[in-house]
Image (cartoon, coloured by chain):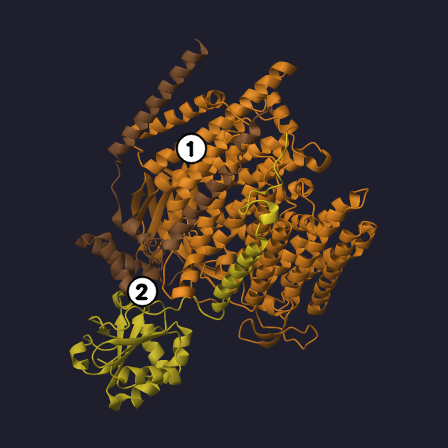
């Protein structure tokens, strides 16, 4: 029953997506067609189908319907409710259902914008058509190679052995489900990180769709750019939050003490983020000066293509990664889709290249446009480095058979200078006027923040922190923070004087009046905090492995780690063995922690889960290396100020989302930047 | 004031002279290359690889017997071809390949092939229990790699893995994963074939 | 204080701070260098999914760290230690690719990208002969 309803929902969405594409293209080509009417039912069909499919899946999971293969193999009756809900997207087929749902939501919001317009909206109709094609593909996956509603026809001891794509086949219910992957039911972030990431990933389909429609219509100009700005910002915000949460989850769950390993799938999410960030900035240049039209097309096509590449790498099994889903026939389908997207999009772009021209040229490189171009250069080079590093071993092996390993040390080495250059460019941007800037003007604005940053670093150097990366990174990050604070202060002070307001009220007034601009500035501030946190936690980490008998205390970075006793308990879905640890400092007991080994039912391997004592000064991170009858071996880490990484990253994403909520509605949301430095 | 002709800044000059066909070719070729590289990896396990030790002499190591005192003496095995199989009680494919290994050890004894089973990251009791359950063979030395030194010496990636050494002590091939009898025999035949000087 | 004086003082203060920082960095870090940590971070754990041997709790990784510690104590050079592992596991066990003919593209592509990008940006500047007669 479940399978039949679910499959009907998927089929409905599939057919509606096809209708959306066909009718959308018709409306795009013929302005006399009323898009609002002709697209209403296809959109409704897509949204309804996606909602019903997700709901049916989740309800079936919560009700332990083990006649569905996916549920029998990825959930269990003993799984806690939160992780049952998360099981809806924890494995391959379910993750595609989530993708389809998020896509449907975006289709609906685009339709609402199109429907609200008085005149015929060929661009909007074309965009909906392209979105319809993308939706058609993903629901097509759900009907064929990635069917979440496959019924179980042969059961194993636990879970389902063999399934059938035909929802009316005679199904058997497995005795018990295998439960989610051991690593995916340890932490609440499992429920939050994927949806956030998907809103970011899938959201990038919208500017892509508008760009494709613009190309097909031969429209140059900034219409498509202006209309999609909202979606691009929202998608970027969610993507940022999703990536940061992924890093935090990794830190809390995997036990190696890190949050970013340049794992291929982490890179797969980072690549679209880099290009999307470049796109956000160069879009501003196009809207203010009319330049970089062709480049913006290249960026938006690349962003979308990178999201599909990322999906492909994660799900096809061609790369070894902590994150890989198991190999499945979805690989070839995604590869074909990626190829078609690349060839069709870039081909169309080349065909229309004479239309997408930019006449205005740069007056001078020493201008805000110049800084934006530098930003784009740095971000694009960063993306190329990450892309090449990730794919190089594969390509080398295919062409020569030789093996090469490209891992963290390589990426770290490349990322550091690029990131520092980016921080410095970000600080310079807002204080550099458009068109052409005078050095003395810019220096006057940068002088005090720079001196403050240098003073702080000099103090650190005197106190003994002399690692070059630590010093330069700190200077760059604090410089950026002070520049933003100074800008805010100067702008607020001007308003406070003019309107006789108190300074805090003036700050609120300034930021809310120009939320688009200040959302960006706060986002930059978040990035600076993130950079600060990375530099500190990477360079001032203390790590020691200690072996303790019950009652014994070891000291790491001034914290006393006392091994109280081993413990063991049985929970419905797992057996937990671990060490009870007391963390204290200077005689005061700070925390009771339980680094442990979780052994889930139906899994022979134990998964080590670290215990983390978090404080404002930093984290004491305990990783259980081995638990012996009489001793315990712990990896103890001290990460100073690591919370800056999560908080900074989240601010970067949330600030942008805030700016969308707070903004004063203007027609098509053209940014009205009253930035410091614009006066000249 | 005259604005220059609409010019996107991409290489190739003015619109009329711009070689659009060149861009199409680049797109097409790039797509084919990318498709080919990715598609060639379908169905392969990215963790399997060729051992760099092939063609090298087998390193010397000392391994304690699993069930007796003392350690395996490689001098006694000189002149014999070796099949070295890494296994563990917790390894599922090891169970399915066990009968094939036992059968081959009996079948090839008279051709001068000796089998060594090395226990990988397991407890002595559980390993012995595995052999109790799935059977022991003669012409088979059961040893333990307690400190994981041997697996590092041979570059072992996981279990099960099987190495084939010829009568001159040169490593001839390595098989990763559970092995079946036919593959086992073909590797043994190859190890018994002398290398052309 | 005139604007000019302020500017000069600003430059002097900045230069002074930079000097302190640079001298401090040259004098060097007060912490010891940990060869095992830095080498271990560049060797992959063969039974994990991309982790370095110093980051992985697996038995194989820990055994390799022990071997690494012995090699460092013996005084072998970085390359000799890497060669020990690549001779057994293949080049893929390294996380930091060497600069060889095979990895040439890996290092060259980013440089080409930077060069290409800079050229494209410079080519976007307004050509001098079109500026005459215009008001900016």
Say which of C88 and A380 sits in front: A380
Q: In front here: B103 or A569? A: B103
| Residue lying at 60% horizontally and 70% vertically, measured from the top left | A69
Q: Is residue A346 above or below residue A237?
A: below
Chain identifier matching the orange colour in the rendered picture: A
From the viewer's perspective, tell me whether residue C4 is left or right of residue A299. Answer: left
Residue at the disc numbered 2: C89
Q: Is residue A293 above or below residue B116?
A: above
Q: Nearer the viewer, residue B14 or A588?
A: B14
The numbered dot on residue A644 is: none
Residue bearing the label numbered 1: A476
Looking at the rendering, which quadrant does residue A341 occupy? Answer: bottom right
Q: Position of residue A362 (x, y in %)?
A: 55, 33
* Pointer 2 chain: C
From the image, state the color of chain C.
brown
Query: Which quadrant of the view contains residue A405?
Result: bottom left
Graded by Cα atoms within 10 Å as few (under 14), some (14 to 19) or many (20 or more), the crowding at tag 1 reads many
Q: The C terminus of chain A is located in which quarter?
A: top right
Quadrant of the frame with the N terminus of chain A: bottom right
The tint of chain B in the picture is yellow
Q: Position of residue B162 (x, y in %)?
A: 33, 76
Q: Nearer the viewer, residue A634 or C39?
A: C39
SS type, badge 2: helix
């Amino acid at each position: 029953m479940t399978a039949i309803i679910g499959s009907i929902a998927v089929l409905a969405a599939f057919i509606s997506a096809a209708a959306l594409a066909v009718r959308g293209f018709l409306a795009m080509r013929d302005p006399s067609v009323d898009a609002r009417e002709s697209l209403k039912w296809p959109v409704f069909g897509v949204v309804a189908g996606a909602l019903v499919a997700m709901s049916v899946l989740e309800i079936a999971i919560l009700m332990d319907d083990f006649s569905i293969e996916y549920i029998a193999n990825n959930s269990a009756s003993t799984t806690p409710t939160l992780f049952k809900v998360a099981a809806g997207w924890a494995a391959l087929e379910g993750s595609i259902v989530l993708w389809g749902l998020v896509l449907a939501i975006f289709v609906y919001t685009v339709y609402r914008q199109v429907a609200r317009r008085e005149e015929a909206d060929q661009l909007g109709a074309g965009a909906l058509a392209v979105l319809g094609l993308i939706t058609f593909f993903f629901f097509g996956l759900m009907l064929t190679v990635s069917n979440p509603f496959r019924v179980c026809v042969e059961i194993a001891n636990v879970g389902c052995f063999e399934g059938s794509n035909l929802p009316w086949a005679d199904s058997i219910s497995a005795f018990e489900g295998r439960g989610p992957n051991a690593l995916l039911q340890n932490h609440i972030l499992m429920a939050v990180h994927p949806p956030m990431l998907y809103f970011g990933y899938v959201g990038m389909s919208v500017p892509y769709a508008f760009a494709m429609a613009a190309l097909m219509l031969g429209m140059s100009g900034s219409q498509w750019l202006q209309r999609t700005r909202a979606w691009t910002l929202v998608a970027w915000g969610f993507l940022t939050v999703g990536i940061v949460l992924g890093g935090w989850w990794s830190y809390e769950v995997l036990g190696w003490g890190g949050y970013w390993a340049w794992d291929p799938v982490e890179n797969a999410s980072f690549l679209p983020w880099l290009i999307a960030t470049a796109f956000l900035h160069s879009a501003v240049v196009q809207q203010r000066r009319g330049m970089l039209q062709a480049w913006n097309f290249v960026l938006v096509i690349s962003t979308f293509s990178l999201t599909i590449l990322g999906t492909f790498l994660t799900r096809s099994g061609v790369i070894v990664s902590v994150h890989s889903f198991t190999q499945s026939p979805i690989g070839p389908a995604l590869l074909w889709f990626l190829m078609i997207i690349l060839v069709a999009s870039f081909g169309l772009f080349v065909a229309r290249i004479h239309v997408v021209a930019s006449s205005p040229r740069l007056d001078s490189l020493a201008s805000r446009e110049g800084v934006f171009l530098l930003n784009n250069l740095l971000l694009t080079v960063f993306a190329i480095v990450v892309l090449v590093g990730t794919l190089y071993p594969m390509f080398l092996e295919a062409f020569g058979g030789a093996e090469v390993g490209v891992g963290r040390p390589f990426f770290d080495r490349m990322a550091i200078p690029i990131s520092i250059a980016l921080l410095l460019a970000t600080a310079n941007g807002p204080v550099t006027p458009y068109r052409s800037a005078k050095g003395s003007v810019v220096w006057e604005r940068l002088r005090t923040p720079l001196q403050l940053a240098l003073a702080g670093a000099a103090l650190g150097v005197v106190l003994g922190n002399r690692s070059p990366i630590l010093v330069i990174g700190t200077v760059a990050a604090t410089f950026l923070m002070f520049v933003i604070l100074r800008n805010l202060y100067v702008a607020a002070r001007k308003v406070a004087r003019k309107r006789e307001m108190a300074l805090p009220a003036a700050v609120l007034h300034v930021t809310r009046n120009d939320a688009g601009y200040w959302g960006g500035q706060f986002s930059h501030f978040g990035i600076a905090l993130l950079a600060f946190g990375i530099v500190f936690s990477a360079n001032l980490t203390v790590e020691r492995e200690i072996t303790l008998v019950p009652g014994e205390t070891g000291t790491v970075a001034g914290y006393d780690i006392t091994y109280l006793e081993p413990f063991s308990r049985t929970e419905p879905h797992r057996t937990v063995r671990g060490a009870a640890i007391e963390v204290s400092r200077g005689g005061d007991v700070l925390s009771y922690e339980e680094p442990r080994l979780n052994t889930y039912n139906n899994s022979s391997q134990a998964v080590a889960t670290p215990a983390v004592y978090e404080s404002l000064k930093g984290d004491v991170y305990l990783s259980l290396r081995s638990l012996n009858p009489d001793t315990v071996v712990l990896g103890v880490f001290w990460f100073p100020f690591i919370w800056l990484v999560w908080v900074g990253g989240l601010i970067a994403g949330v600030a942008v989302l805030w700016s969308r909520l707070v903004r004063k509605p203007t027609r098509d949301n053209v940014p009205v930047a009253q930035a410091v430095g614009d006066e000249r | 004031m005259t604005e220059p002709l609409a010019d996107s800044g991409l290489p190739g000059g003015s619109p009329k002279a711009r070689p659009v066909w060149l861009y199409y070719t680049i797109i097409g070729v790039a797509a084919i290359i990318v498709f080919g590289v990715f598609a060639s990896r379908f169905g392969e396990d990215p963790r399997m690889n060729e051992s760099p030790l092939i063609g090298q002499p087998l390193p010397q190591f000392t391994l304690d017997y699993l069930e007796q005192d003392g350690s395996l003496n490689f001098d006694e095995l000189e002149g014999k071809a070796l099949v070295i199989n890494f296994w563990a009680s917790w390894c599922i494919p090891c169970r399915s390949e066990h009968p094939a290994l036992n059968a081959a050890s009996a079948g090839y004894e008279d051709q001068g092939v000796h089998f060594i089973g090395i226990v990988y990251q397991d407890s002595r009791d559980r390993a012995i229990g595995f052999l109790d359950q799935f059977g022991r063979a003669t012409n088979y030395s059961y040893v333990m790699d307690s400190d994981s030194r041997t697996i590092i010496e041979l570059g072992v990636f996981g279990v099960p893995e099987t190495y084939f050494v010829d009568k001159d002590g040169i490593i001839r091939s390595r098989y990763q994963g559970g092995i079946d009898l036919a593959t086992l025999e073909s590797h043994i035949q190859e190890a018994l074939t002398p290398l052309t000087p | 204080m005139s604007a000019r004086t302020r500017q000069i003082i600003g430059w002097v203060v900045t230069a002074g701070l930079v000097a302190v920082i640079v001298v401090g960095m040259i004098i060097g870090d007060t912490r010891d260098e940990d060869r095992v940590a830095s080498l271990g971070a560049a060797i992959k754990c063969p039974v994990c999914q991309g982790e370095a041997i110093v980051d992985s709790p697996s038995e194989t990784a820990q055994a390799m760290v022990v071997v690494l510690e012995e090699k460092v104590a013996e005084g072998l050079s970085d390359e000799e230690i890497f060669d020990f592992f690549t001779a057994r596991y293949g080049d893929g066990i390294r996380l930091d690719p060497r600069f060889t003919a095979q990895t040439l593209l890996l290092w060259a592509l980013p440089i080409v990208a930077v060069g290409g990008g800079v050229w494209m940006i410079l080519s976007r500047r307004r050509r001098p002969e079109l500026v005459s007669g215009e008001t900016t």
